[in-house]
Amino acid sequence: MKKIAVVILNWNGAKLLEQFLPSVLAFSDEANIYVADNASTDNSIEVIKSQFPSVKIIQNTGNFGFATGYNQTLQFVEEKYYALVNSDIEVTENWLTPILNIFDDQPEVAIIQPKVLDYKKKTHFEYAGAAGGFIDKFGYPFCRGRIFDTVEEDKQQYEDEIEIFWATGACFFIRKEVYRKLNGFDDSFFAHQEEIDLCWRAFNLGYKIKYTSKSVVYHVGGATLNEGNPMKTYLNFRNSLLMLTKNLPKNQLLPILFIRLVLDGLAGVQFIFKGKFKHCLAIIHAHFAFYKLAKVYYNKRTTNQKSNYFMINSIVVRYFLKNGKVFAELF
């Protein structure tokens, strides 16, 4: 039996499957390939059966989004390691070998991310994940290679293997045993921030998350929910607050949440000045949704939250007030 399963979550992505599945099939001899279909209404299933007959299909009964879609699917996938791969990812030759080597040689490593470059501009990192993710004290995520809207050119500045705090869900490797021990992604998130939450829970249990530059993929990004969609703003802001509620050390929870709510309000004001009124409303709706769910998520807390989860106090201050536009300028 092969050690690794490449699992591609799909919803109405027939054209993406036609474009990107060939590279996965060409360069993944070490893996079994699955497509997890979230009840697509296009011809996705027909495309897979006719053009990619070696791909195994798992059909979910509804469009459950990223979190529940994978949770439903991975109940039926028994390979030792999972590669959760977006349908808009182009992989490269030998992309799996470095991942398998780390998993096999470093049992303390539970989650791994490859180098993620932009499919449309292959000289640059891609927004979602880049060269590995971190968060600041208030839960704002940033990456080596991407801070807010500033994306770096790949000049081999991140040619290494290091510990990171979170790995992108666009191309996310995890041990099956750890995924199941953590009960997978948080179903209520639907999409966005669920991979950071899962990594944070793994971190709190003492597992390591790593980035390796030896594995390279290219990501289109925004193929299912683009950056200009207010729904994406809503999910990012709501889920970030829920994630903080679950994972922050108890003595830091209320003060950090308060400051984070204030900072979110400032982000809403910024959207108003930019004329993006729907995004400001999305933040307001996200906060009201958070208030409704806060007690439920507080009850999901465990007793092993660590206080050393963040790299810097405030990426907002570093980026907007101290001109820390790229990762190297943060220190």
Image: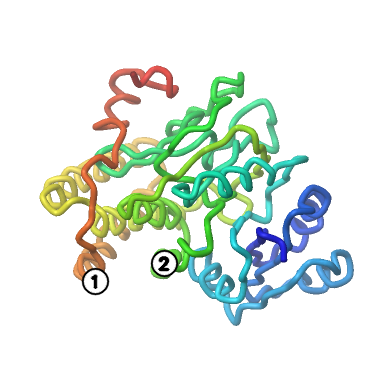
Query: Residue 237 in the image: x percent, y percent?
Result: 34, 52
Query: Could you tell me which secondary element the residue under label 2 belongs to?
Result: helix
Amino acid tagged 2:
Lys
Q: Is residue 205 positioned above or below 315 on the image?
A: below
Relative horizontal placement of residue 285, taking residue 88 as reference (left or right): left
Query: Residue 28 in the image: x percent, y percent?
Result: 76, 52
Residue located 48% across and 41% down the image = 210
Residue located 53% across and 72% down the image = 64
Q: Quadrant of residue 224?
A: bottom right
Whether residue 241 appears in this view of the structure is yes
Query: Could you tell me which secondary element the residue under label 1 belongs to?
Result: helix
Q: Which residue is mark 1?
A: 296
Q: Is residue 112 positioned above or below 246 on the image?
A: above
Mark 2 or mark 1: name the one nearer the start of the chain.
Answer: 2
Q: Which residue is mark 2?
A: 181
Foreground residue, 209 or 238?
A: 209
Q: Quadrant of residue 321?
A: top left
Amino acid tagged 1:
Val
Quadrant where the image shows the C terminus: top left
Scheme of image coloration: rainbow
Q: Residues within 10 Å of mark 2 (few under 14, many from 20)?
A: few
Relative horizontal placement of residue 155, taking residue 178 as reference (left or right): right
Query: Residue 177 in the image: x percent, y percent?
Result: 49, 64
